[in-house]
Amino acid sequence: MTIIKQKTESCSSTFSEILSDYRASLFRTSLSSEETLDVLKEHAVNIDNYFQSCFESSSIGPKMDFIKNPYAIIALGGYGRSEQCVYSDVDLLFLFQKHVPPATDQLIREIIYPLWDLKIEVGYATRSLDECIFMAKSDYEILTSLRDARFICGISSVFTKLRDLVHRKIVKRNAKKIMNWLLERNIERHKDFGDSTFLLQPNLKEGKGGLRDYHTLRWIAGIKYDLQQTRDLEFQGVMSHLEYNELMAALSFIWNVRNKLHLHTNRKCDQLYFEYQRPVAESMGFTDENGQSAVEKFLGELHAHMAFIKNQLQLFLYEFGYGKKGKWRQSMKKISETPGIHLVKERLNFDSPETILHNPEMLVKIFEVSARQKMPLSREAERLVREFNYLVDASFRSSLLVRNLFEQVLLLPAPMFNVLEQMLNTGFLSSLIPEFKYIVNRIQYDAYHLYPVDRHSLRTVYTLKMLGESDDLESDELCARLYKGLKRKKILLLAALLHDIGKGQDGGHSHAGAEISSAVLKRMGYSLREIDLVAFLIEHHLLLIQTATRRDINDEETAIACARKIRDGRRLRMLYLLTVADSIATGPKAWNSWTASLLRDFFLKVLGILEKGELATTSVVNRIEKKRKAVINAGLGEGEDGHLFDKMSPRYVLYTEVRDILTHIGFYKRLSSNPFVLNVAHDSTLNSRTVTICSKDHPGLVSEIAGVFTLNNINILDVKVNTWKNGIALDIFTVEPPPEQLFEDERWQRVEKNIAAVLAGELDLQSEMLNTPVIGKRDESHISRRPNRVVIDNDGSSFFTIIEVFSHDFKGLLYKVADAISRLGLNITVAKIATEIDQVVDVFYVRDENEAKIDDPGAVEQIKKEILAVLPARMNR
């Protein structure tokens, strides 16, 4: 569909109406990705037709001395490249051969204003030839827009002269400087917008793997080869025919997504926010099926296309000698010590395709050489690996030589690039381990996992190898010492590579992954003992982190139960390292200083039990008596106050250090003249605060304090509730630092004032929280689609009922749940806050008023009912 040119007295308004009708009809139709390129070009052509028609019918043009000072209307930017999405800007240059005449303002009003009335964003510049060249020499942003310039109407010789001057006077003389500027700008852009190949809310244009990466490749290749069109990338040998077709498919898909995003937002928008993902996915034909949502499948395909563009730019830059430090290297050629493989421009390549045909093991050998020499594969080598992947058959996968070479790739120290990622990008990893293809670009649609499953698995391996070798990782000396002390690192690395291979299978992914990995390793010829150990690590790779964050690790029973399941110290060390690497590779919501501290402490407790035996610790009576003597000797004395120790609960004495007991006694002594005592201790190592509140106990005290913290935008990490036999409550909250730490003292003074008001019955928490904004809370832009649920566990502890509450995070969650538990007449002893995918898990250790567990089926159902009632209205179970 195109605009029919016609002359009229009010050309602008008539032509703008036709253009408006065209845009409405074209972009409201359902278009496939294959049609997108033609649609973008057709959209640009019809905008061209508007300007051409207005130029022919202009009442201002004839007054502008067209003969002596010819001019042209030129398209710039995306419009110049004919990449015109529905709400993309229309950038124009009114170019005059000699000077910009006074009547130009009238011409602009005649042509541009009607487009503004249509809400089309039009940017324009009016310049002479000399002004363009002068400005482009000093401003490369202007230069790149001119490189994309396209003639629309007017005198074509003006446009031709501009292109000639730009090439001769600027590009040809400053080629290297311009390319360096493009690359530096590319690096800065990636820092600002991130890697769109795995982000859950990618920027389609500016992020790594986005459209601007393609533009950068095209601009630099244009300088090197004077490209006139994208197809020249293939004609000049920059890309193979297959790669060019893949590039076009990737661009078509991304442009289609961008068009759909524009239509759903009714504006120019390049950030694919959560709220638009489902409507965009469904409009492109994606549906929920096979255990994967439409959005997950849509993002998986989008990330795959963006990863291809990112990889093509990286390969192109490296082949031209652009190194990590931002300098252009000299080309070089060096034959390595491996027959059949050589170096070109510091990249590995095969001597010839026949090398692979005669010896298929070279397909894995080149990756081993890459890991050993820390040299990536060349573009040509990657092409050959893709083309010859069909040689990876059953005999190849069971070859001992292939297995040994693959193990070397896993074991060799990690270079700056990831060799496993090269294996993934070329399809070799999925050819060697066919089961891996089911997690390639598999998205987990939550705010917890940053990476697709395949990339996360590779990052877990990379993180393990970097433990103790890099200051950039959030590891510690313990991890480095444990990893270096392992005798069979390959077992751990295999488990890391395959730990999530069960994602997407029916049932739990850990159990499914253990079964799948067993089949993979059996096919590769590993021993039964090795297979069983890898399967164990995979099946239980969540055991330590879930126990540490959801159970009371001060309870020796918790550590003993875990030790019985793991059985020996070697397994525990491997499991701990896998847990750390898995958590770091997942993202900041899975790994922080608090989580690291919990996990490390729990690991050491379990390790002590495994190495010393369950009965190696002294008896409970002896430990309590030993602490009693230490407290009395420290100054408590045997007088009247000496009986205070006997008022403390055995649990409190067992799990509290002597110095802390003495501090708490001091709080108790101050209580006689105060309704409560509040103390805040800073922990800079864990970036947390320990808030201790000593008060007379009463039902609902924990929920009231939690409500005050919520009121003051303070996030709670952990709660330990201690009730002495004399009716004194000692509640210890571990919390995140409050927002605006510059005014932290004032914040704690307000907390203290609020607690006093609540205890005195002068402050209604419910109504107060409704009127208080949340500051610095967790990101709630992505609300979980998982149903709320309450799980009651009477097997995890001999003395307590454990309540697990799964819900998306919202203001006052802990307060509301704790208040519901209190109204049920239950006493909270421990509360923990953890995560489960994109949900928060609040865990409570409770007993009833008779200090007994709640095991009556009717009472259990009542607990579930009351807690679910205070959670947001959504699917509950």
Image: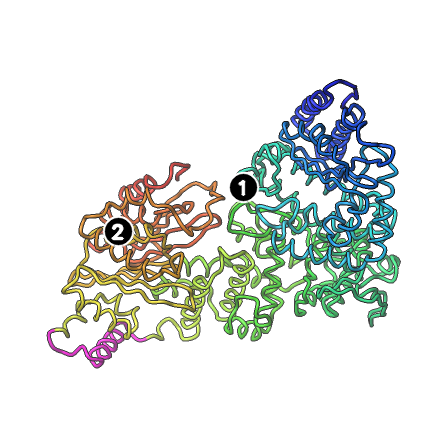
Q: Position of residue 754 (x, y in %)?
A: 25, 53
Q: Nearer the viewer, residue 830 or 854?
A: 830
Q: Amino acid at mark 1?
A: Phe
Number of numbered tags placed on the structure image: 2
Q: Residue at x 65, y 56 (%)?
A: 188
Q: Secondary structure at mark 1?
A: helix
What mark, if any, has residue 792 been given in the picture? none
Expressed as whole percent of the image width and height from the top left, the position of residue 564 reads 42, 64
Per the image, is 381 magenta? no
Amino acid under disc 2: Glu
What residue is at 70 percent from the left and 58 percent from the top?
Answer: 184
Q: Is residue 363 left or right of residue 202?
A: right
Pointer 1 residue: 274
Q: Residue at x 32, y 50 (%)?
A: 711
Is 232 in front, or is 436?
Answer: 232
* Left or right of 426, for residue 763: left
Give, as a single range, the part of the protein colored magenta. Answer: 618-640
Which circle's residue, 2 or 1, is located before the other in the chain? 1
| Residue 704, numbered circle | 2
Q: What SS does tag 2 mark?
A: helix
How far from the left and from the top, in percent, is residue 628?
A: 22, 76
The kind of secondary structure the magenta stretch mainly shows is helix
